[in-house]
Image: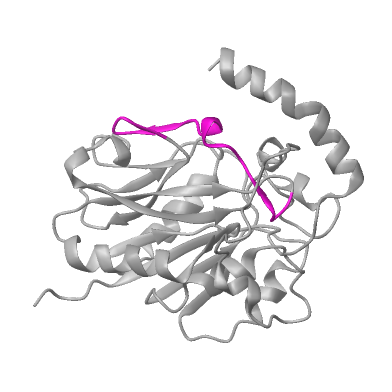
């Protein structure tokens, strides 16, 4: 019988109070521990995290970081991870139960030989009712393109470390080779996905997103595709939540819709002809 792998999640946050409760609660049952380090939140992020009463959470107020020293925080968190595998989850990533279960089962079954796990993302735009078209996916890993993300790594990868400024930060081996560019046969490409709110406002307080490096660059005003009526949303969206946790079912305002209507055609032209 194969030994069950220990999996610790790494969650580095700042001004994430709109989504962080849903992100943490969506994976907490499946991982062994979650390191949540705050880097200077000024909204309700810290209060929300502390409202989650679980022995699996190890919370730390790390302190503010700049775009340049951001990877130092990631590296410190990596060094504090005493597990077989490290699972990355940001404060804007929300999982469905079956999808996170499949990731954990794949690690337990193939985690000796495999080095990393890559999954797809469902990128929300405008609000929780719309998502970005697949053609907008700009990532390429081992010849596969689209909305892809490296989300788990074997801690036994030689020289595993974090590097790169915020916005371009990643994980590398002893030869400074990106983990996703190592042996493609050791990458587990899983047919699962998580809901990614990176293009939405991530703080409930006006202006707080601007305090976070590169956050303004990720915010998109765009008319996306409408989810079908039978879409399976992450179950955590329907859980009873603390009063301090914002309602996720908020629609775009009229002003946001107007701005998106103006920008969307230009973005589609750019994707079609200038990628």
Residue 84 seen anywhere in this rendered image of the structure: no
- Asked if residue 212 lies left or right of residue 89, the reply is right
Residue 180 seen anywhere in this rendered image of the structure: yes
Q: Residue furthest top?
A: 273
Q: Residue furthest right?
A: 255
Q: Is residue 220 above or below residue 8?
A: above
User: In this orientation, which residue lies closer to the viewer: 33 or 77?
Assistant: 33
Could you say where residue 13 lies in the image, as x and y percent from the top left? 60, 59
Q: Is residue 262 above or below residue 189?
A: above
Q: Residue furthest left?
A: 1
The structure residue drawn at horizontal position 14% and vertical position 55%, both measured from the top left corner, is 113
User: In this orientation, which residue lies closer to the viewer: 188 or 43?
Assistant: 188
Could you say where residue 8 lies in the image, as x and y percent from the top left? 37, 69
**Quadrant in which residue 9 is drawn:** bottom left
- Asked if residue 247 lies left or right of residue 39, the reply is right
The structure residue drawn at horizontal position 64% and vertical position 71%, both measured from the top left corner, is 237
Could you say where residue 97 lies in the image, as x and y percent from the top left? 45, 71
Q: How many marks?
A: 0
**Quadrant in which residue 43 is drawn:** bottom right
Is 14 covered by the magenta stretch?
no
The structure residue drawn at horizontal position 60% and vertical position 57%, both measured from the top left corner, is 92
Quadrant of the image containing the N terminus: bottom left
How is the rendered protein coloured? one colour
- Asked if residue 234 lies left or right of residue 173, the reply is right
Is 139 covered by the magenta stretch?
yes
- Asked if residue 26 lies left or right of residue 162, the reply is right
Q: Is residue 97 above or below residue 141?
A: below
User: In this orientation, which residue lies closer to the viewer: 249 or 187?
Assistant: 249
- From which residue to which does the magenta span run? 127-145
């Amino acid at each position: 019988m194969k030994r069950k792998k220990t999996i610790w999640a790494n969650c580095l946050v700042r001004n994430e109070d709109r989504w962080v409760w849903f992100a943490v609660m969506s994976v907490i049952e499946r991982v062994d521990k979650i390191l949540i380090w705050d880097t200077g939140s000024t909204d309700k992020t810290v209060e929300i995290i502390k409202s989650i009463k679980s022995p699996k959470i190890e919370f730390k107020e790390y302190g503010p970081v700049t775009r340049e020293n951001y990877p130092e925080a990631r590296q410190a968190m990596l060094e504090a991870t005493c597990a077989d595998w490290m699972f990355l989850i940001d404060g804007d990533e929300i999982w469905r139960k079956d999808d996170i279960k499949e990731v954990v089962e794949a690690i337990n079954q193939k985690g000796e030989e495999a080095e990393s796990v890559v999954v797809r993302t469902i990128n929300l735009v405008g609000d929780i009712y719309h998502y970005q078209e697949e053609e907008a996916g700009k990532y390429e890993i081992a010849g596969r393109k689209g909305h892809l993300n490296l989300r788990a790594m074997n801690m036994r990868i030689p020289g595993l470390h974090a590097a790169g400024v915020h916005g371009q930060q990643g994980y590398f081996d002893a030869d400074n080779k990106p983990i996703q560019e190592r042996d493609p046969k050791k990458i587990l490409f899983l047919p699962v996905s998580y809901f990614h709110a990176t293009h939405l406002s991530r703080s409930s307080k006006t202006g707080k997103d601007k305090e976070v490096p590169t956050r303004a660059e990720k915010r998109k005003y765009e008319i996306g595709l409408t989810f079908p009526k039978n879409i399976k949303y992450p179950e955590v969206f329907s859980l009873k939540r603390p009063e301090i946790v914002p309602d996720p079912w908020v629609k775009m305002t009229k002003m946001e819709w107007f701005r998106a209507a103006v920008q969307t055609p230009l973005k589609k032209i750019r994707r079609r002809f200038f990628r």
